[in-house]
Amino acid sequence: MSEPKLTRTVIVTNPQGLHARPADLFVRLATRFAAKVEVVKDHERVDGKSILAIMTLAATEGTRLSIEADGPDAQQALDALSALVEQDFAENENSHS
Amino acid sequence: MQKLQGIAVSPGVVIGEAFVMDTEGFRIPRRFVPLAAVEEELQRLERAFAAAADEIGGHRDAVARELGRQYGAIFEAHLQMLRDPQLREEIEQAVRERNYSPEFAVSRTLRRYAKVFQSLESGPMAERAADIFDIEKRLLRHLLGRRREGIAHLTSPALILAHNLTPSETANLNRKFVRGFVTEIGGAGSHTAIVAEALEIPAVVGVGPFLAEVSGGERVIIDGDQGLVILQPDQETLDHYCRVVERHRSDALQLEGLRQLPAETVDGARIQLHGNIEFPHEVEHCLERGADGIGLYRTEFLYLGAATEPDEEAQYQAYAGVLKAMGDKPVVIRTLDLGADKLTAAQADLERNPFLGLRSIRLSLRNLPMFRTQLRAIVRASVLGDVRIMFPLISTVLELRQAKMVLADVMEDLEEHGLPFRRDIKIGMMVEVPSAVILIDHFVEEVDFLSIGTNDLIQYTLAVDRNNNEVAGLYTASDPAVLRLIDTAVKAAGRRQKPINLCGQMSGSPTYTMLLLGMGFRQFSVAPSAIPEIKRICRSLTISQCEAVASRAMTLENARDIKSYLKEELKKVLPERAS
């Protein structure tokens, strides 16, 4: 791939952290993009399209996460995903598959 | 390797294959698939995933329709987990590369995640483990379909690892193949403990959550002496435990030598050692060890093991079998003592406080036809041996009189029908509620014998639920308040020269033998496996020694001091005994 890998750092601000429901929303959004998405917490790096992997990060309120995207629509993916986290996973139900 | 500490409830050491039960009590099998069948198995896996996804989708829609969309969200998350590419990949890899059966692969992979979630500190995340088990259960249900194996269908030796065992599960289990139990919850005196003791197999309970860390088929060690469970043991540990198993075997042989000898103290006091039994086959365990009788025949399992209430004939057959086997030795049959911990969860829910509720003799007196059926069966069997009847959980004098009246009525009835029975059947009661001790002078006039049930007496005296881990530490036979009640009862019985027995777990614990003999007991009823050890102790001491120990122990004011004092004294008498 010629596109460079893009990274953005976000801070989890919703009080419950990245538990099942937000993780579900995150993965649902991530899978809409072709880009490979990874989430990094400290030294742990997991697949951003795997809900179980994301849940194992146990990202609580205040956790700093790096989202990395690699692929043709990496920029769009990053924008959308970081917005989701920053808006406390506000119910975006029209994205329902 | 992982060592887990729980509560030791039935002694012995065993090394064997884990039979892990899911939350519904079904086995998670460890199987391997032949290379040629891998593709087919992967398709089966695919179908199970699809079926599980359909099912969850259905739940989501139904819940969303009824309660609103946000309530369907948890199923949405479950669906997402089921669709997780990483999860699927890991499971498929386990089938393809390690030739695990899809069932085993699903269980192992998901349990690894569950374990991670359980280890997470934050509350809501840790609870996610329950979601994982839910998905596991769903997939297994689709994979196994009707081939799901319950504990009743064991076909090879196994160690049962479960969250908890319900009485009906244990009543129906295939005893031939069960070699040990480990449960996540439960305490000393819990149902699993009693069953394990009856089967004479090692058991550890109250280990805490650990099922996520083990898969069916793995090798596990249960150390019922130390209350340890060892998962994935390393070679060194395995070698060590093989030696322990060997030592146990030779120790048992040595105790075997005591079989023909009486339980007699050095100064000549003859102690009656009786066995507690649950199942008729345990009579053999008692006879093998030279028991002087059956001090407690629990009859609950006749009821729990069957789908319907056992009729008079079925009960008669069971009692008759035990009586014939025991010859002229006494057999004390305790009438139905179904308690909250022995009912299925559904029934227990009906009562807010089942241990203080409708159980035991109260239940019998409320269900007279059932009670009469049991008494008829016992009385009819009386011609076959020295049967004695004991009423459990007596808390008022009136209750005892009522029970005796029902018995008299049953006898009259048999007489009218011209059926033979013994008129002089001895009648006794369990002393296991503090009120029975407080009014012991009244009770002792009404019965032929008494038997102290320490398990319940302790919990009712100290207000401690023995199965609640939060407070289980307070549950101890060494508590001075408990000892004082026991002492009161034994003295009252002595004054009226009524035989008194002690049949709770306390009586089978070597720690208390000196104390109890010193208080005045001359009769114990213990798990059959404990008979040789208690006999050895009785044969190593004098009553005056015991009396000195008892009077000293009764002056101590807390349980810990009492217990360590008793252990020290025991060591003095039997220095070679490995604690």
Image (tube, coloured by chain):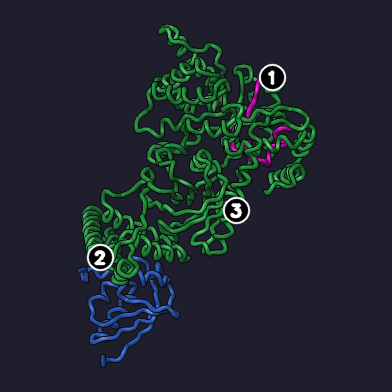
Chain colours: A blue, B green
| Image position of B213 with respect to B459: above or below | below
Label 2 – label 1 distance at C-alpha: 77 Å
Give x and y (percent) for residue B117. 42, 65
Q: How many marks?
A: 3
At 72% from the left edge and 35% from the top edge, which residue is drawn?
B539
Residue type (three-letter) at the residue carrying disc 3: Val
Of the residues tagged 2 and 1, which is closer to the observer?
Answer: 2
Q: Earlier in the sequence, mark 3 or mark 2?
A: 2
Residue B98 appears left or right of B528: left
Q: Earlier in the sequence, mark 3 or mark 1?
A: 3
Please state the extent of the stretch shown in magenta in the rendering.
Answer: B497-517
At 56% from the left edge and 61% from the top edge, which residue is drawn?
B237
Residue type (three-letter) at the residue carrying disc 2: Ala
Give x and y (percent) for residue B405. 50, 14
| Image position of B359 with respect to A69: above or below | above
Please indicate, yes or no, whether residue A21 appears anywhere in the rendered image. Answer: no
B141 and A60: which one is in front?
A: B141
Q: Which residue is mark 2?
A: B36
